[in-house]
Amino acid sequence: MEESSEIKAKPQRQLLIATDGSESAEEAADFGIEMVGSGKGKVYSVYVIDTTSYGSIPMNEIWSKEGYEQFEKMGREATAYVEEKAKAAGLEAESILLNGNPAEEIVNFAEEQKVDMIIVGSLGKGRFERVVLGSVSEKIVRHAKVPVLVVRERHKRK
């Protein structure tokens, strides 16, 4: 057998780090970027403005332009944190703002971009809170077609 003189380049990894700007999301971003390390890779920093709470009512009838702009500002700030951390680690980074159901939008975006892994924070809610409120991270784990890393807040660990 003849050995190829070409060295195969390691494929670029693509990660989706979902953020809501919380401490838990920042810890997930820090852990995920540290885990990937420096080098080849791309990080999508994704923030979803949850527009599902109001069902079929058009968004412009619920939120004023200023109110929606406030959510966009929060999203830009949240994704900027992840993007800065990724770039500091030598990774390519892109911030994405989406509208809709957070879990669905994150899973759909991950599929469209063919990401290798989704990283998301978890507040570590108790059983009652999960049943009543639902959990974005839990829904992502159930529906994603790629591995999902859920990072719990450090100060919530026992």
Image (cartoon, rainbow, N blue to C red):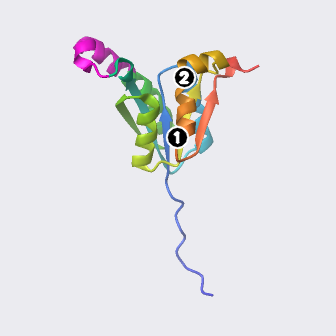
Q: Amino acid at mark 1?
A: His
The image position of residue 93, as x and y in percent, is 42, 40
Q: Are marks 2 and 1 in contact (CB under 8 Å)?
A: no
Residue occupying the far right of the picture: 158
- Residue at 54%, 18% in the rendered image: 133
Helix, strand or loop at label 2? It is loop
| 140 lies above or below 66 | below
Q: Earlier in the sequence, mark 2 or mark 1?
A: 2
Determine which quarter of the picture holds residue 38.
top right
Residue 61 visible in the current orientation: yes
**Percent position of residue 48, x then y:** 40, 28
**Residue 61 position by quadrant:** top left
**Residue 63 seen in the current view:** no
Q: Which residue is mark 1?
A: 143
Give amino acid for label 2.
Gly
What residue is pinned by disc 2? 134
Image position, residue 67 (x, y; %): 29, 12
Name the residue located 53 percent from the left edge and 68 percent from the top edge. 8
State the extent of the magenta-drawn residues as a range.
Answer: 56-74
Q: Estimate how packed mark 1 is, as few (under 14), some (14 to 19) or many (20 or more) residues with alpha carbons within 10 Å.
A: few
* Camera-side residue of 76 and 120: 120
Q: Secondary structure at mark 1?
A: helix
Magenta highlight on residue 73? yes
Q: Is residue 59 within the magenta segment?
A: yes
Q: Give the alpha-carbon distance from disc 2 to disc 1, as whole Å.
A: 14 Å
The structure residue drawn at horizontal position 52% and vertical position 28%, both measured from the top left corner, is: 136
Residue occupying the point 47% across, 23% down: 20
Q: Position of residue 102 (x, y in %)?
A: 44, 29
